[in-house]
Image (cartoon, grey):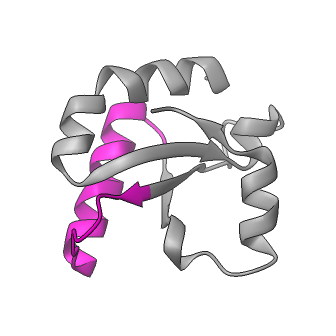
Amino acid sequence: MDKSTIIAKLREHESELKAAGIEHLFLHGSYARGTAIREVSDVDVIAEFAPGRRLSLLDMVAIENRLADMLGVRVDLSPAKGLKEPVAAKASREAVLAF
């Protein structure tokens, strides 16, 4: 699986993911850079959630699991507001907008 395939799959499920509270979703990390090793690399995504939307830890785990089911690989979901420097700076440089 490559970056374009992941982005296409995420876009296919955009309405479902928006209903779950995700306003924007970005791919970053090794799949965004094209350096992923399929057997060991997680798909790293950053979610910007709708303003005022409060999600519990269980909600976040459910979304992360749903993303993994969609893509067929492990997913690491990070809320955009939860990223700390220098991770946030690096992620913003390499992030690819899915929707």
Q: Is residue 65 above or below residue 26?
A: below
Can you say which quadrant of the picture contains the C terminus? top left
Magenta span contains residue 26: no
Residue 15 coordinates in the image, percent (x, y): 21, 31
Residue 78 coordinates in the image, percent (x, y): 50, 65
Which residue shows up at 61% across the image and 75% down it? Answer: 83
Q: Is residue 43 left or right of residue 89?
A: left
Which residue shows up at 78% across the image and 45% down it? Answer: 94
Q: Which residues are magenta?
A: 48-73
Q: Quadrant of residue 91?
A: bottom right
Residue, far front = 51
Magenta span contains residue 59: yes
Q: Is residue 89 above or below residue 10?
A: below
Q: Quadrant of residue 54?
A: bottom left
Can you say which quadrant of the picture contains the N terminus? top right
Q: Is residue 63 left or right of residue 7?
A: left
Q: Is residue 99 above or below residue 94?
A: above
Residue 96 coordinates in the image, percent (x, y): 65, 36
Which residue shows up at 47% across the image and 18% down it? Answer: 8
Who is closer to the viewer here, 8 or 81?
81
Res 44 seen here: yes
Residue 48 coordinates in the image, percent (x, y): 43, 57
Give the tally of numbered discs. Answer: 0
Which residue shows up at 23% across the image and 60% down it? Answer: 62
Q: Is residue 70 left or right of residue 45?
A: left
Who is closer to the viewer here, 32 or 38?
32
Res 37 seen here: no
